[in-house]
């Protein structure tokens, strides 16, 4: 039987509920891989009423015997990693021989967070989490990044830290925080952090391909969402990596020829955190109601999320660029009490109807959404056990979405807990 190697991606601006779906799917896989991003992502899982938010370690860690891998495409804050490992171990989760981290992942150092805060203090801010993610990726592509594999040659590592710090001080001379940093202290602190987690590191590209050769099933988990992709998102209001399915290969070392399925996660409505255009954003009481019922606050920052109707133009774009083969819809129950529900089927731009997504934010900010109105289901979805039991108005809404994007919805989340899921 052929390996089941699937990529799971968010199809909006992040916060689609990927953590719950990964947790639910993990029983069908042997390995779950996080392939990009850093601790700027928060994946929330609720099991037996207990809420846990993971920022780095894949959500599959809560399924017994699952191996979890943090891939080379991520950037890792050692403090955040140590805290998360401690949190899981405190709850009795076994990590030894279950958690592996790529030696080729890049490290977020204290100076990255300082640079992030400096950049966000300017007028043209992006709305980042200020956790040093962007500056760490910047160093990666400027070829001065620091990997965990640099601990294999500690003298070179010391030199790199010193050169990087002196360079940053030279281009940000006004930063007193940077001047307070000392390269020896940075190295010593990093060495102490690494000693606590060294046992988890491996050349995971070999590990993953070995798993596949032995018939193991792999689930690759993205962070953020497709519309925040550094190449395909609303640049510059994006994240600093590739959450799209293509990033799963470069961020893990698994070749594209071995990927045979892409699961796209979409909310029944749309949210966005931070700056950037959002065509279906609601500024009225309806938007506030969605936010309140959906508890729309960022799992990492606590920032309130902007809320709006489902944007099918953006969704179809995300489906195309990711090669999505099946969909999972989350937070359907948030819309239970609405008598009418809208979905954007087209945009109007300069007096013309368009059905393509302009990724240029300065074009996107000028589009007007054209809506199709659906009759609300005005009944509780939570507790239903099969698709046939769901209200016909909800099924009409779902089936219109399937027809629009030409991809079936296979999973329907009807509530926040692990058990609130229907397979269609």
Image (cartoon, helix red, strand yellow):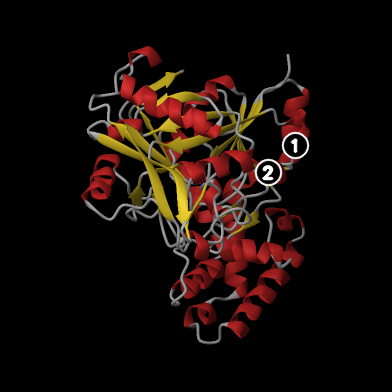
Where residue 58 sits: x, y (%)?
Answer: 54, 37
Q: Is residue 245 above or below residue 228?
A: above
Q: Residues within 10 Å of mark 2 (few under 14, many from 20)?
A: some
Are dots 1 and 2 in contact, CB under 8 Å?
yes
Q: Residue furthest front?
A: 351
**Which label number is shown at residue 246?**
2
Q: Residue at x 48, y 78 (%)?
A: 177
Q: Is residue 424 above or below residue 85?
A: above
Residue 153 located left or right of residue 63: right
Residue on which disc 1 sits: 256
Circle 2 SS class? helix
Indicate the quadrant where residue 267 lies.
Answer: top left
Where residue 376 sits: x, y (%)?
Answer: 27, 30
Q: Residue at x 63, y 55 (%)?
A: 231
Q: Residue at x 53, y 82 (%)?
A: 179
Which is more N-terminal, label 2 or label 1? Answer: 2
Q: Is residue 93 visible?
A: no
Q: Residues within 10 Å of mark 1 (few under 14, many from 20)?
A: few
Quick one: 402 or 20, which is closer to the camera?
A: 402
Mark 1 and mark 2: Cα distance apart in space: 8 Å
């Amino acid at each position: 039987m052929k390996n089941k190697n699937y990529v799971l991606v968010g199809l909006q601006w992040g916060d689609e509920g990927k953590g719950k779906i990964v947790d639910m799917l993990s029983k069908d896989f042997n390995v779950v891989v996080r392939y990009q991003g850093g601790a700027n992502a928060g994946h929330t899982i609720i099991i037996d009423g207990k809420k846990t938010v993971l920022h780095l370690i894949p959500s599959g860690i809560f399924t017994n015997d699952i191996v979890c891998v943090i891939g080379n495409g991520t950037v890792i804050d050692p403090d955040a990693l140590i805290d998360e490992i401690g949190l899981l171990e405190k709850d009795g989760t076994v990590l030894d021989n279950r958690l592996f981290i790529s030696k080729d992942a890049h490290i977020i150092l204290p100076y990255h967070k300082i640079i992030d805060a400096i950049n966000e203090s300017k007028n043209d801010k992006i709305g980042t989490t200020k956790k040093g993610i962007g500056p760490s990726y910047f160093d990666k592509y400027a070829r001065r990044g620091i990997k965990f594999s640099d601990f294999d040659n500690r003298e070179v590592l010391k030199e790199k830290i010193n050169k990087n710090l002196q360079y940053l001080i030279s281009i940000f001379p006004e930063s007193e925080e940077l001047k307070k940093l000392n390269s020896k202290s940075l190295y010593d602190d990093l060495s102490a952090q690494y000693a606590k987690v060294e046992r988890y590191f491996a050349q995971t590209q070999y590990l993953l391909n070995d798993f596949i050769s032995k018939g193991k099933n792999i689930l690759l988990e993205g962070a953020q969402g497709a519309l925040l992709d550094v190449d395909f998102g609303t640049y510059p209001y994006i994240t600093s990596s590739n959450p799209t399915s293509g990033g799963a290969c470069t961020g893990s070392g698994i070749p594209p020829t071995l990927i045979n399925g892409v699961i796209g996660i979409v909310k029944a409505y749309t949210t966005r955190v931070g700056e950037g255009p959002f065509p279906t954003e609601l500024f009225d009481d309806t938007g506030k109601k969605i936010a309140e019922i959906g508890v729309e606050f960022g799992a990492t920052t606590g920032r309130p999320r902007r809320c709006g109707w489902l944007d099918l133009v953006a969704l179809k774009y995300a489906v195309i660029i990711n090669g999505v083969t099946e969909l999972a819809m989350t937070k359907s129950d948030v819309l239970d009490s609405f008598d009418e529900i809208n979905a954007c089927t087209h945009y109007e731009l300069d007096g013309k109807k368009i059905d393509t997504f302009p990724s240029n934010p300065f074009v996107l900010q000028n589009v007007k959404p054209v809506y199709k109105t659906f009759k609300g289901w005005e009944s509780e979805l939570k507790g239903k056990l099969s698709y046939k039991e769901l209200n016909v108005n909800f099924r009409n809404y779902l089936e219109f979405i399937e027809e629009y994007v030409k991809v079936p919805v296979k999973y329907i989340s009807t509530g926040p807990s692990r058990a609130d899921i229907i397979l269609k």
